[in-house]
Image (cartoon, rainbow, N blue to C red):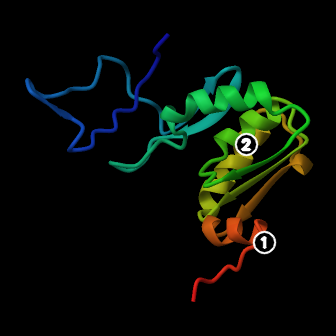
Amino acid sequence: PLRAVHWNARQKRQRSREGVLVPPGAPLLAAEHVGSEIGLKYRIDVPPPGRDPNLYLDFRAARRWLAANSEGRDVLNAFAFTCGAGVAALAGGARHVTNLDFSQSALDVGRENARLNGLPAGAFECVCGDALPALRQLAGLPTNTD
């Protein structure tokens, strides 16, 4: 059941043929909130206008898949943002998850998400760095393109 809503009105997306869409009638989300999806908890913050609330909702099918298919695997979560995919993978039985993102503050939220779910900190690694050079390095390719 819908208990609260964060309305993220982006100019290009909020217009329809009939005019401007308005938010549904529900109380606004508190500044700091813990949401849940497939039994996992995620910190949801009210972001500045035009930013996402710490969890990409269009990635929920992937989180479900990871929770169902990660048992016994080592998982690399590149472009991790707040580690939603990494949390789902570790909760689904992954041996180890490495979350890679350029934003340390996003990774900090990811660590909090792992803690909220009682996941083992030793199996949940967060690496702050540019994902593309890191992926090239992991593949054994040169990291510069000069």
The vertical placement of 145 against 36, above or below, is below
Q: At x 73% / y 33%, what residue is drawn?
A: 88
Helix or strand or loop: what does disc 2 sit on? helix
Question: What label does residue 119 carry, if any?
Answer: none
- Residue 27 falls left or right of residue 54: left
Question: What label does residue 86 carry, if any?
Answer: 2
Image quadrant of residue 95? top right
- Residue 91 falls left or right of residue 44: right
The vertical placement of 110 against 145, above or below, is above
**Residue 84 pos. (x, y %):** 65, 40
Image quadrant of residue 105? bottom right
**Residue 90 pos. (x, y %):** 81, 37
The vertical placement of 138 against 88, above or below, is below
Amino acid at the residue labelled 1: Gly
Dot 1, how many residues are within 10 Å of its Cα: few (below 14), some (14-19), or many (20+)? few
Find disc 1 in the rendering and name its residue.
140
Image quadrant of residue 112? top right
